Amino acid sequence: MNTPCAKPPTRAASARTTVSLVGAGPGDPDLLTVKAIKTIRRATVLLVDDLVGEGVLRYARRSARVVHVGKRGGCASTPQAFIEKLMVSEALRGETVVRLKGGDPLIFGRGGEEAEHLRAAGVDVEIVNGISSGLAAATALGVPWTHRRHAHGVMLVTGHAGESNADLHWPTLAAAAAQGLTLVVYMGVQRLDTIRSGLLAALPGATPAALVQNASRNDERQVVTTLHDLLAATRQARICSPAVLIVGDVLQGLRALDCGTRQVA
């Protein structure tokens, strides 16, 4: 008697697959880690964020399928649910999937959310760290996040108004910064007025502040100023997103600089 042939096991049933969440750094492809380059070269499918530098994709194989899944505040964005579904479906089809993110996946990159979704779907996750835009901004200015005489710690916060930080209390953060912490604000340009007002509740107007747009890229722009003059200096310098705000005494050495724009040619 003939018996029906058993269906071959699916990729998910025979062996767990892995999606790599790779940090592409702040934009300059020379700042990619060796592991990031190796992982990008292996990929057959790349899901690429809007803020990933163009030069980064030169490391992808020619046959790789590149899917741009841009997400930027104030612009049309790819729904997060679509991105998560696509990662799972492509991985379970047997593709080598790399989710390529600007900066570091675990610093305001939704890497935690995506890792949770993948694991819940039976897909393993590899995290490949990248240089955060906040660190690149400090480097571009020539200042550290911490300094033995000026700052014994650093706070990383997002200025983007969302469900998780709708009640973010800027005066409280300012009070912490006044105790010797450097404040690094991601995605805060659109709410700069609110952020500045909140910080001035506990910090003097003369507190050094700097904004860096497109840190490490050819079109990088910087403005070095004070909290009091932050809005006017930002408008004059035409700084816009994506930009990182740094506030604190680590910027003391830059206060002698003109409060204008420095642009990397």
Image (tube, helix red, strand yellow):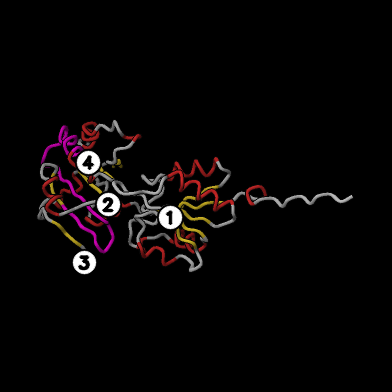
Mark toward the viewer: 3 or 4: 4
Q: Earlier in the sequence, mark 1 or mark 2?
A: 1
Q: Horizontal and vertical percent for residue 97?
A: 51, 55
Q: Amino acid at mark 3?
A: Ala
Mark toward the viewer: 3 or 2: 2
Chain part drawn in magenta? 194-223
Q: Amino acid at mark 4?
A: Arg
Q: Marks 1/4: CA distance?
A: 27 Å
Q: Is residue 99 visible?
A: yes
Helix, strand or loop for disc 1: strand
Q: Which mark is residue 212?
A: none
Q: Amino acid at mark 2?
A: Pro
Helix, strand or loop for disc 2: loop
Helix, strand or loop for disc 3: loop
Q: Residue at x 45, y 55 (%)?
A: 47
Mark toward the viewer: 3 or 1: 1
Q: Earlier in the sequence, mark 3 or mark 1?
A: 1
Q: Residue at x 11, y 39 (%)?
A: 205
Q: Is residue 155 visible?
A: no
Q: Horizontal and vertical percent for residue 124?
A: 55, 47
Q: Marks 3/2: CA distance?
A: 18 Å
Within 10 Å of disc 2 (Cα), the crowding (few <14, some 14-19, many 20+) is some
Q: Which mark is residue 242?
A: 2
Within 10 Å of disc 3 (Cα), the crowding (few <14, some 14-19, many 20+) is few
Q: Pointer 1: what residue?
A: 100
